[in-house]
Image: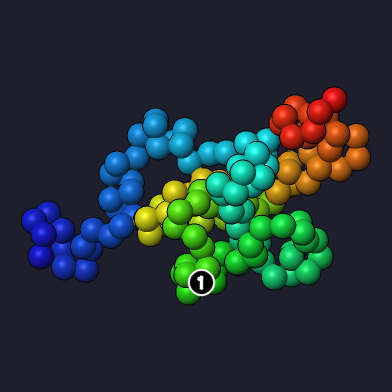
Amino acid sequence: MLPGYAAEALPSAFDTFLTKFDYETRADMKIDSKTLIALLLEKKAVMVDVRFPEEMKAWKMGFGLYIPLNELPKRLAELPKDKIIVAACPHKDRSSIAMAYLRTKGYKAKYLTDDLIGLAESLRGDNAKDFLEDSGIAKP
C-alpha cells in the first residue's frame, strides 16, 4: 500500500493524468475542425466518433472510426498508437471523457473543440467552400 492512500484508493492512471494536468496539457488536448481536416488529409490523425448507436443511425459523418464511448475500453486495439486520436461527439461531453481516457492509455488524444455539429456545419453548402479554402485544402 502506498503512503497516504487507503487500500481501496490506489492511484490510477487517471489520478496520474490529473496530477500532471497544467495549462500546456489543457491547450494540447484541444483541436478544431480546420486542423483536424488537415491532419486527416496528411494521415497524421484519426477521428473517433464516440456517439451513442441511435445517434449514429440517425446521422453519419461518413469518415473516421465509430466507437461508442462505452465500447472504447474493449476496442482500443482498433486505434493506431502512431497517430493523433481525435475524439468527437455533438457537444464535447463524451469526446472530453474519451480524450482523457485515451491519454491515460498512452494515446496522443485530443477532442474536437467545435464538436461534430460544428464540423458538419463547416462541411455543408457555401460554408464547405470557404472552410476548405481557409484550411488551405482547396484553392480559391
Query: Where the C terminus falls, by quadrant?
Result: top right
Q: Is residue 133 visible?
A: yes
Q: Is residue 123 above or below residue 136?
A: below
Tell whether 77 sits left or right of 91.
left
Q: Residues within 10 Å of mark 1 (few under 14, many from 20)?
A: few
Q: Is residue 83 above or below residue 131?
A: below
For the residue labelled by badge 1, is the local secondary structure a helix, a strand or a loop? helix
Tell whether 48 sits left or right of 135.
left
Q: Is residue 62 above or below residue 20?
A: below
Tell whether 38 sits left or right of 126.
left
Residue at the location (49% across, 60% down)?
80
From the viewer's side, name the closer residue of 51 and 83.
Answer: 83
Q: Amino acid at mark 1?
A: Arg
Residue at the location (38% across, 59% down)?
105
Residue at the location (69% across, 70% down)?
53
Residue at the location (79% across, 39% down)?
122
Q: Is residue 103 above or below residue 10?
A: above
The furthest residue to the right: 125
- The colour scheme used here is rainbow
Q: Quadrant of residue 31?
A: top right
Q: How many marks?
A: 1
Q: Which residue is mark 1?
A: 75
Measured as percent of width and height from the top left, residue 111 is found at 56, 46
From the viewer's side, name the closer residue of 48 and 93.
Answer: 48
Q: Quadrant of residue 130?
A: top right
Query: Where the N terminus falls, by quadrant?
Result: bottom left
Measured as percent of width and height from the top left, residue 41 is found at 66, 45
Measured as percent of width and height from the top left, residue 50 is found at 61, 60
Measured as percent of width and height from the top left, residue 98 is found at 51, 56
From the viewer's side, name the closer residue of 38 and 53.
Answer: 38
Q: Is residue 32 visible?
A: no
